[in-house]
């Protein structure tokens, strides 16, 4: 069984490559390195002992996709490729609409031409409207508030329409909650460019001495300690969810959304304190104003993924902190991105 992974050099994609290879799948990757580098795939090869077939190409480019599909016998696709920074999407909405929507539309078109109709798509908890009660279930009201979230929502709609029109397609829309952590080897992990927007990379960069202190965005929310609460999920659990989802997509038809979360909320201070406890590192912090657009708490009901996909998260917050720190302390500069390294066969 051969799976094409778009955006496979990125944070979640690289971890999913490891889990797919471990589960016995043949994989090939397409990535344009707009937010990653070839080194992550070299590390996946190191972890798995397998070489990875790789195409450096833009998923928006249909002619490049046609070459990939004509040269390989692809059974299914996992589509990670896309831009993901919420703040940047507010400043450059067209860049987000163009890349995220065009890449998906081009991919669908070429998949259809080559008769490949099983797709797993990286959606996000951000597609849920902000006024839903917790925990979030897949049937709740949708409504994104920033261009990034809207690209995910629009793509979900496109894929639902596709499956309504063509009953031989199968699409799993995976709504990730907050992926953190890294592979236990410490070889692959999240390598954000510039100052991180997200909490865990920020905490680990404070711990490693790259940033001075954590700004806690608001301590007056209606949560256990007043700070924002999220459903953090270990990236390896998330990657294993893709293995289950691809099995489901290959054996079914239709379009279904699945929450991939743990079902448990952890506040900013609880995550910071767990990290300090597990690593023994100092993470100074200060309370700062709330961040625009943030909700008090967000967490999943992951029951559908358990019932239908047979998947549930296993790793706890301590493991997430331990693994995030192993990656960060072994790689203080991330992958030291150098796209010129020609290490892939
Ligand atoms: P990432 O930026 O690390 O990975 C995305 C990969 O896609 C990168 O390697 C990038 O170079 C590549 N890419 C982007 N546009 C491309 C294009 N047009 N052609 C080819 N390659 C392209 O991000 P990630 O954290 O691994 O996220 C993967 C997916 O999951 C994204 O679609 C993201 O929106 C979604 N997601 C991420 C999170 C999160 O918190 N990390 C949460 C929910 C959903
Ligand atoms: C978590 C909590 C912050 C940074 C984002 C995207 C979402 C999805 C996952 C892609 C919040 C607080 C954060 C900091 C802080 N991505 N915080 N200080 O906002 O839940 O979700 O990533 O789909 O679309 O919006 O994650 O890690 O940014 O924030 O206090 O320096 O940490 O206020 O309560 P978020 P996050």
Image (cartoon, grey):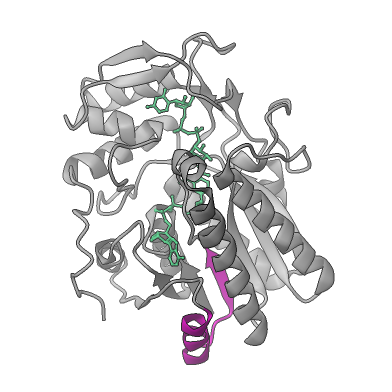
Measured as percent of width and height from the top left, residue 182 is found at 35, 46
Q: Is residue 97 left or right of residue 321?
A: right
In the image, residue 74 lies in the stretch drawn in magenta: yes
Q: Is residue 230 above or below residue 104?
A: above
Q: Which of the pair 20/136 is nearer the observer?
A: 136
Residue 36 position in % (x across, y down): 32, 58
Q: Is residue 324 among what the camera can see?
A: yes
Task: Judge whether 107 appears above or below 68 on screen.
Answer: above
- Residue in the image at 46% along x and 14% along y: 218
Residue 335 rendering spot, x and y as whole percentages:
22, 54
Q: Residue at x 49, y 76 (%)?
A: 61
Figure quadrant of the C terminus: bottom left
Q: Which residues are magenta?
A: 62-79
Would residue 273 be seen by someone viewing this image from the given angle? no
The quadrant in which residue 194 appears is: top left
Query: On the image, which quarter does residue 16 sit in?
Result: bottom left
Q: Residue 19 lies in magenta, yes or no?
A: no
Q: Is residue 145 above or below residue 26?
A: above
Locate the N terminus and report the quarter of the image it occupies. bottom right
Q: In the rendered view, would you say 204 is above or below 154?
A: above
Q: Nearer the viewer, residue 322 or 118?
A: 118
Q: Is residue 208 left or right of residue 30?
A: left
């Amino acid at each position: 069984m051969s799976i094409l992974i778009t955006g496979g050099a990125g944070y979640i994609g690289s971890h999913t490559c490891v889990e797919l290879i471990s589960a016995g799948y043949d994989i090939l990757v397409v990535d344009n390195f707009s937010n990653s580098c070839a080194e992550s795939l070299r590390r996946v090869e190191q972890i798995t002992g397998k070489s990875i077939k790789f195409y450096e190409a833009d998923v928006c480019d249909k002619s490049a996709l046609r070459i990939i599909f004509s040269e390989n016998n692809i059974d299914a696709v996992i589509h990670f490729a896309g831009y993901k920074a919420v703040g940047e999407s507010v400043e450059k909405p067209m860049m987000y609409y163009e890349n995220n929507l065009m890449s998906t539309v081009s991919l669908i078109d070429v998949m259809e031409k080559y008769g490949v109709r099983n797709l797993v798509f990286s959606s996000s908890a951000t597609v849920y409207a902000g006024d839903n009660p917790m925990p979030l279930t897949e049937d709740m009201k949708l409504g994104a508030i920033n261009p990034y979230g809207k690209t995910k929502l629009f793509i979900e709609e496109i894929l639902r329409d596709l499956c309504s029109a063509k009953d031989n397609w199968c699409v799993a829309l995976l709504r990730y909650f907050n992926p953190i952590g890294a592979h236990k080897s410490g070889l692959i992990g999240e390598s954000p460019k510039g100052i991180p927007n997200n909490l865990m990379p920020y905490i680990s960069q404070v711990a490693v001495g790259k940033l001075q202190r954590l700004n806690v965005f608001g301590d007056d929310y209606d949560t256990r300690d007043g700070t924002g609460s999220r459903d953090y999920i270990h990236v390896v659990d998330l990657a294993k969810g893709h293995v289950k989802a691809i099995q489901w997509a290959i054996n079914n038809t239709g379009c279904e959304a699945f929450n991939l979360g743990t079902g448990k909320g952890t506040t900013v201070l609880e995550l910071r304190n767990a990290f300090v406890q597990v690593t023994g590192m100092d993470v100074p912090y200060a309370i700062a104003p709330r961040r625009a657009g943030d909700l008090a708490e967000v967490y999943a009901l992951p029951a559908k993924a358990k019932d239908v996909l047979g998947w549930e998260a296993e790793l706890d917050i301590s493991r997430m902190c331990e693994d995030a720190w192993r990656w960060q302390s072994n790689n203080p500069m991330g992958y030291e991105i150098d796209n010129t390294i020609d290490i892939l066969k």
